C-alpha cells in the first residue's frame, strides 16, 4: 500500500522544510546541564506537533524558545525540542521504517526527559516484517490487534526503567483524530484504543488524544483538517501543543 501521507503534503501542512524531520543534524545531541529535552517521534502528525511545539514554547517564553527552547518554563532549565519524526511511517511497515529499533537506540544513547510518540495514520494496511513480507493481514482483526499491540509495547518498553528505578524518560502517547478518509479514521481510533490498553500497566507511559485535546471527540475533525482530509492545520497543531505543554515540561 502506498504511503498515505506524502512528504510534500507534510511540508505544506506544518510550514517547515523536511530537513527538520528525521535528519535533524542534532536530533540525538547530548543534553547539556539543566536542559529539559523533549523528543517528538512518529509520522507527519508528530513532525507538525514538534514544529509547532517549538513555536508555542517560544511564545510562552517571551520569544526565547524556538528550536532550542528557552529558560522561562523550568526556572534555569532550558527546554529543548528535538523532532525526529519521519513522514509516511508507522508501526505497520518496519521494512519502511523501524520505530522500535530507532527508539531503542535513542533510549540507550541519548534518552530524552520526555518522548512524544504519535503514529497511526499510515497504518491502515497489512502488517509486514522487516523484509516486507506480510505477517498479519488487516482483514484478520484479532491477529492484527495483537501484533500491533506487541509493536506498541516494543516502543514503550524501549524506555522501561530498571527495577526499583525512576524512569529516565516519560513517554507521552498522542492518539490521532478521525480524518475524512474512513479507513484512516477508523485505524486512528483503533490504534489509539490499543495504545491505551498497552499503556495501562506501564506507569512511565502517559496517554493523550488529539481528539480530546482539540475537542473533536469521535467525530471527523473537520475544523482542523487540511483540504487533503488527512493532515492537521498549523492552528490546530499549535492548539494541541498548548494543551499538552504543562504535561511535557512538568518534572
Image (tube, rainbow, N blue to C red):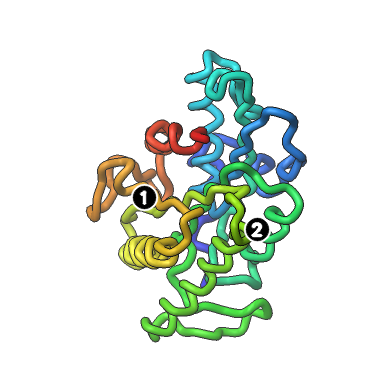
- The one nearer the camera, 226 or 81, is 81
For the point 39% across and 53% down, which residue is it? 176
Determine which of the numbered discs, if any, sits on residue 184 in the image.
none
Residue in the picture at 42% in, 80% down: 138
Q: Is residue 232 above or below residue 182?
A: above
**Image location of residue 47, percent across then percent down:** 55, 45
Q: Position of residue 180 (x, y in %)?
A: 31, 56
Mark 1: few/some/many CA within 10 Å (<14, 14-19, 20+): many
**Which secondary structure, mark 1?**
strand
Q: Is 17 situated left or right of 25 in this image?
A: left
User: What residue is disc 1 on?
Assistant: 209
Dot 2 falls on a residue whose secondary structure is helix
Q: Using the image as rendered, state which of residue 1 and residue 199 is in the foreground.
A: 199
For the residues labelled 2 and 1, the Cα–Cα distance comes to 21 Å
Left/right placement of residue 156 relative to residue 97 reads left
- Name the outermost residue toward the top: 62
Residue 48 shows in the view: yes
Kindly identify the residue that appears in the image at 35 percent across and 45 percent down.
225
Where residue 103 is drawn, which disc sits there?
Answer: 2
x then y, percent, for residue 128: 57, 79
Amino acid at each position: 500500500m502506498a504511503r498515505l501521507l506524502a512528504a510534500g503534503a507534510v511540508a505544506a501542512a506544518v510550514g517547515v522544510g523536511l530537513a527538520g524531520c528525521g535528519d535533524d543534524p542534532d536530533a540525538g545531541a547530548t543534553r547539556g546541564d539543566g536542559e529539559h529535552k523533549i523528543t517528538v517521534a512518529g509520522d507527519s502528525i508528530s513532525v507538525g506537533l514538534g514544529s509547532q511545539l517549538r513555536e508555542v514554547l517560544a511564545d510562552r517564553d517571551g520569544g526565547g524558545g524556538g528550536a532550542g527552547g528557552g529558560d522561562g518554563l523550568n526556572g534555569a532549565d532550558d527546554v529543548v525540542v528535538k523532532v525526529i519524526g519521519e513522514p509516511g511511517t508507522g508501526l505497520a511497515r518496519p521494512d519502511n521504517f523501524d520505530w522500535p529499533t530507532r527508539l531503542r537506540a535513542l533510549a540507550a544513547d541519548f534518552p530524552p526527559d520526555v518522548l512524544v510518540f504519535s503514529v497511526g495514520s499510515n497504518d491502515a494496511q497489512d502488517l509486514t516484517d522487516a523484509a516486507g513480507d506480510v505477517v498479519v493481514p488487516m482483514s484478520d482483526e484479532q491477529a492484527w490487534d495483537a501484533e500491533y499491540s506487541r509493536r506498541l509495547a516494543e516502543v514503550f518498553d524501549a524506555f522501561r526503567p530498571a527495577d526499583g528505578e525512576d524512569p529516565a524518560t516519560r513517554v507521552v502517547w498522542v492518539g490521532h483524530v478521525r480524518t475524512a478518509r474512513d479507513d484512516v479514521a477508523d485505524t486512528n481510533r483503533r490504534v489509539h484504543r490499543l495504545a491505551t490498553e498497552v499503556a495501562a500497566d506501564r506507569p512511565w507511559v502517559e496517554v493523550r488524544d488529539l481528539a480530546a485535546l482539540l475537542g473533536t471527540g469521535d467525530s471527523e475533525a473537520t475544523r482542523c483538517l487540511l483540504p487533503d482530509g488527512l493532515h492537521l492545520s498549523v492552528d490546530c497543531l499549535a492548539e494541541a501543543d498548548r494543551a499538552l505543554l504543562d504535561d511535557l515540561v512538568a518534572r
